[in-house]
Image (spheres, rainbow, N blue to C red):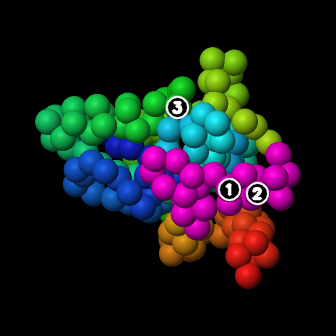
Amino acid sequence: MVMWVFGYGSLIWKAGFHYDDRLVGFIKDYRRVFYQGSTDHRGTPEFPGRTVTLEPAQGEVCWGVAYKVSRKEDEEVALTYLEVREKQYDKKAYVDFFTEPSASSPAVTGVMVYIASPDKSNKNYLGPATVEEIAKQIVLAEGPSGPNRDYLFNLEKTLLQMGCKDEHVMKIADNARKLISGVEE
Ligand code: SIN
Protein backbone atom coordinates (compact mmCIF):
# COMPACT_ATOMS: atom_id res chain seq x y z
CA MET A 1 0.00 0.00 0.00
CA VAL A 2 1.27 3.43 -0.96
CA MET A 3 1.11 6.20 1.67
CA TRP A 4 0.21 9.79 0.77
CA VAL A 5 0.70 12.72 3.14
CA PHE A 6 -0.88 16.16 2.68
CA GLY A 7 1.13 19.18 3.81
CA TYR A 8 -0.43 22.62 4.23
CA GLY A 9 2.10 24.26 6.58
CA SER A 10 5.83 23.68 6.98
CA LEU A 11 5.46 20.33 5.24
CA ILE A 12 5.04 22.30 2.00
CA TRP A 13 8.63 23.56 1.98
CA LYS A 14 10.28 20.94 4.18
CA ALA A 15 9.18 17.32 3.91
CA GLY A 16 12.01 15.89 5.98
CA PHE A 17 11.39 12.34 4.73
CA HIS A 18 11.98 10.42 1.53
CA TYR A 19 9.18 10.50 -1.05
CA ASP A 20 8.69 9.41 -4.66
CA ASP A 21 6.34 12.07 -5.89
CA ARG A 22 5.08 15.51 -4.84
CA LEU A 23 1.86 16.95 -6.24
CA VAL A 24 0.54 20.47 -5.82
CA GLY A 25 -3.21 20.56 -5.19
CA PHE A 26 -5.93 21.08 -2.64
CA ILE A 27 -8.35 19.44 -0.25
CA LYS A 28 -11.99 20.46 0.07
CA ASP A 29 -14.07 21.79 2.96
CA TYR A 30 -11.16 22.98 5.11
CA ARG A 31 -9.48 26.34 5.65
CA ARG A 32 -5.92 26.99 6.87
CA VAL A 33 -5.80 29.01 10.11
CA PHE A 34 -3.01 30.18 12.44
CA TYR A 35 -4.83 28.82 15.46
CA GLN A 36 -2.39 26.26 16.84
CA GLY A 37 0.10 27.23 19.52
CA SER A 38 3.63 25.94 19.07
CA THR A 39 5.83 25.39 22.10
CA ASP A 40 8.17 22.87 20.48
CA HIS A 41 9.06 24.34 17.05
CA ARG A 42 8.26 28.03 16.64
CA GLY A 43 7.84 29.09 20.23
CA THR A 44 8.47 27.98 23.80
CA PRO A 45 6.18 27.02 26.70
CA GLU A 46 6.84 30.53 28.11
CA PHE A 47 6.02 32.24 24.81
CA PRO A 48 4.19 29.99 22.32
CA GLY A 49 4.35 30.73 18.62
CA ARG A 50 1.52 30.11 16.20
CA THR A 51 1.43 27.57 13.38
CA VAL A 52 -1.33 26.61 10.99
CA THR A 53 -3.99 24.00 11.44
CA LEU A 54 -7.12 23.13 9.47
CA GLU A 55 -10.62 24.20 10.37
CA PRO A 56 -13.67 22.59 8.72
CA ALA A 57 -15.15 25.09 6.24
CA GLN A 58 -17.90 23.88 3.95
CA GLY A 59 -17.30 24.93 0.34
CA GLU A 60 -13.73 26.22 0.86
CA VAL A 61 -10.49 24.62 -0.33
CA CYS A 62 -7.01 24.49 1.17
CA TRP A 63 -4.04 24.34 -1.19
CA GLY A 64 -0.91 22.40 -0.31
CA VAL A 65 1.14 19.46 -1.49
CA ALA A 66 0.70 15.69 -1.38
CA TYR A 67 3.74 13.46 -0.95
CA LYS A 68 3.73 9.90 -2.19
CA VAL A 69 5.72 7.35 -0.19
CA SER A 70 5.74 3.99 -1.96
CA ARG A 71 8.26 1.78 -0.22
CA LYS A 72 7.34 0.10 3.08
CA GLU A 73 10.75 1.00 4.61
CA ASP A 74 10.34 4.67 3.63
CA GLU A 75 6.82 4.70 5.06
CA GLU A 76 7.99 3.42 8.45
CA VAL A 77 10.80 5.98 8.64
CA ALA A 78 8.49 8.80 7.47
CA LEU A 79 5.79 7.93 10.00
CA THR A 80 8.23 7.70 12.89
CA TYR A 81 9.66 11.09 11.90
CA LEU A 82 6.26 12.74 11.41
CA GLU A 83 4.82 11.43 14.68
CA VAL A 84 7.59 13.34 16.51
CA ARG A 85 7.55 16.44 14.34
CA GLU A 86 3.77 16.78 14.36
CA LYS A 87 3.28 15.63 17.96
CA GLN A 88 1.38 18.77 18.96
CA TYR A 89 -1.20 17.98 16.24
CA ASP A 90 -3.69 15.75 18.00
CA LYS A 91 -5.69 14.35 15.04
CA LYS A 92 -5.02 12.53 11.80
CA ALA A 93 -7.57 12.62 8.99
CA TYR A 94 -7.71 10.86 5.63
CA VAL A 95 -8.93 13.13 2.87
CA ASP A 96 -9.48 13.37 -0.88
CA PHE A 97 -6.81 15.34 -2.72
CA PHE A 98 -7.46 17.21 -5.98
CA THR A 99 -5.02 18.68 -8.48
CA GLU A 100 -7.54 20.20 -10.89
CA PRO A 101 -10.14 22.75 -9.76
CA SER A 102 -12.53 21.53 -12.49
CA ALA A 103 -12.18 17.81 -11.65
CA SER A 104 -15.12 16.13 -9.97
CA SER A 105 -13.14 13.10 -8.82
CA PRO A 106 -10.00 13.30 -6.65
CA ALA A 107 -6.47 12.69 -7.93
CA VAL A 108 -5.73 10.70 -4.76
CA THR A 109 -7.99 9.38 -2.01
CA GLY A 110 -7.09 8.55 1.60
CA VAL A 111 -4.35 11.17 1.92
CA MET A 112 -3.19 11.47 5.53
CA VAL A 113 -3.16 14.91 7.13
CA TYR A 114 -2.22 16.14 10.62
CA ILE A 115 -4.73 18.47 12.26
CA ALA A 116 -4.59 20.39 15.54
CA SER A 117 -8.16 20.34 16.82
CA PRO A 118 -9.93 22.68 19.26
CA ASP A 119 -10.59 19.70 21.56
CA LYS A 120 -9.78 20.12 25.27
CA SER A 121 -7.13 17.41 24.92
CA ASN A 122 -5.13 19.69 22.58
CA LYS A 123 -3.58 21.85 25.27
CA ASN A 124 -1.64 23.98 22.77
CA TYR A 125 -4.67 25.12 20.78
CA LEU A 126 -4.98 28.93 20.83
CA GLY A 127 -7.89 29.52 18.47
CA PRO A 128 -8.96 32.73 16.76
CA ALA A 129 -7.56 36.18 17.47
CA THR A 130 -7.37 39.37 15.45
CA VAL A 131 -4.94 39.58 12.54
CA GLU A 132 -2.95 42.17 14.54
CA GLU A 133 -2.72 39.92 17.62
CA ILE A 134 -1.68 36.88 15.59
CA ALA A 135 0.95 38.89 13.68
CA LYS A 136 2.39 40.35 16.89
CA GLN A 137 2.68 36.96 18.53
CA ILE A 138 4.39 35.54 15.44
CA VAL A 139 6.85 38.43 15.17
CA LEU A 140 7.90 37.97 18.82
CA ALA A 141 8.00 34.17 19.02
CA GLU A 142 10.99 31.94 18.40
CA GLY A 143 11.56 28.26 19.13
CA PRO A 144 13.96 25.37 18.47
CA SER A 145 13.02 25.32 14.74
CA GLY A 146 13.67 29.05 14.39
CA PRO A 147 11.79 32.35 14.40
CA ASN A 148 8.04 32.08 14.02
CA ARG A 149 8.17 34.88 11.41
CA ASP A 150 10.32 32.64 9.14
CA TYR A 151 7.53 30.05 9.22
CA LEU A 152 4.96 32.71 8.29
CA PHE A 153 7.00 34.24 5.46
CA ASN A 154 8.07 30.83 4.08
CA LEU A 155 4.45 29.75 4.05
CA GLU A 156 3.34 32.91 2.26
CA LYS A 157 6.18 32.60 -0.30
CA THR A 158 5.71 28.92 -1.10
CA LEU A 159 1.93 29.32 -1.40
CA LEU A 160 2.38 32.23 -3.81
CA GLN A 161 4.87 30.15 -5.83
CA MET A 162 2.11 27.55 -6.15
CA GLY A 163 -0.30 30.25 -7.33
CA CYS A 164 -2.29 30.26 -4.08
CA LYS A 165 -3.26 33.59 -2.56
CA ASP A 166 -4.33 32.61 0.94
CA GLU A 167 -5.93 35.77 2.35
CA HIS A 168 -5.57 34.79 6.01
CA VAL A 169 -1.84 34.08 5.59
CA MET A 170 -1.22 37.18 3.45
CA LYS A 171 -3.01 39.54 5.85
CA ILE A 172 -1.02 38.24 8.81
CA ALA A 173 2.24 38.45 6.81
CA ASP A 174 1.47 42.06 5.76
CA ASN A 175 0.77 42.96 9.34
CA ALA A 176 3.95 41.25 10.54
CA ARG A 177 6.03 43.18 7.98
CA LYS A 178 4.54 46.45 9.23
CA LEU A 179 5.37 45.56 12.82
CA ILE A 180 8.91 44.55 11.91
CA SER A 181 9.61 47.72 9.93
CA GLY A 182 8.18 49.79 12.79
CA VAL A 183 10.23 48.03 15.42
CA GLU A 184 13.48 47.61 13.52
CA GLU A 185 13.65 50.87 11.54
C1 SIN B 1 1.58 20.63 7.79
O1 SIN B 1 2.55 21.26 7.35
O2 SIN B 1 0.88 19.94 7.06
C2 SIN B 1 1.23 20.63 9.24
C3 SIN B 1 1.51 21.89 9.95
C4 SIN B 1 2.98 22.20 10.09
O3 SIN B 1 3.75 21.32 10.48
O4 SIN B 1 3.36 23.34 9.83
**Residue 39 falls in which quadrant of the image?**
top right
**Amino acid at pointer 1:** Leu
- Numbered badge on residue 13: none
Marks 2 and 3 sit apart, C-alpha to C-alpha, by 22 Å
Which residue is depicted at the point 75% across and 37% down?
A: 127
Q: Nearer the viewer, residue 11 or 185?
A: 185
- Magenta residue span: 129-153
Choose the circle earlier in sequence order: 2 or 3.
3
Q: Which residue is mark 3?
A: 88
In front of the other: 61 or 38: 38
User: The residue tagged with tag 1: helix, strand or loop?
Assistant: helix
Marks 3 and 1 close (CB-CB < 8 Å) = no
* Residue at the disc numbered 1: 140
What kind of residue is marked 3?
A: Gln
What kind of element bears circle 2?
A: helix
Q: Which residue is mark 2?
A: 136
Percent position (x, y) of residue 180? 71, 71
Marks 1 and 2 in Cβ contact (< 8 Å): yes
> What residue lies at 39% left-to-right and 43% top-to-bottom?
5
Marks 1 and 2, Cα distance to the nearest angstrom? 6 Å
Residue sitting nearer the eye, 132 or 111: 132
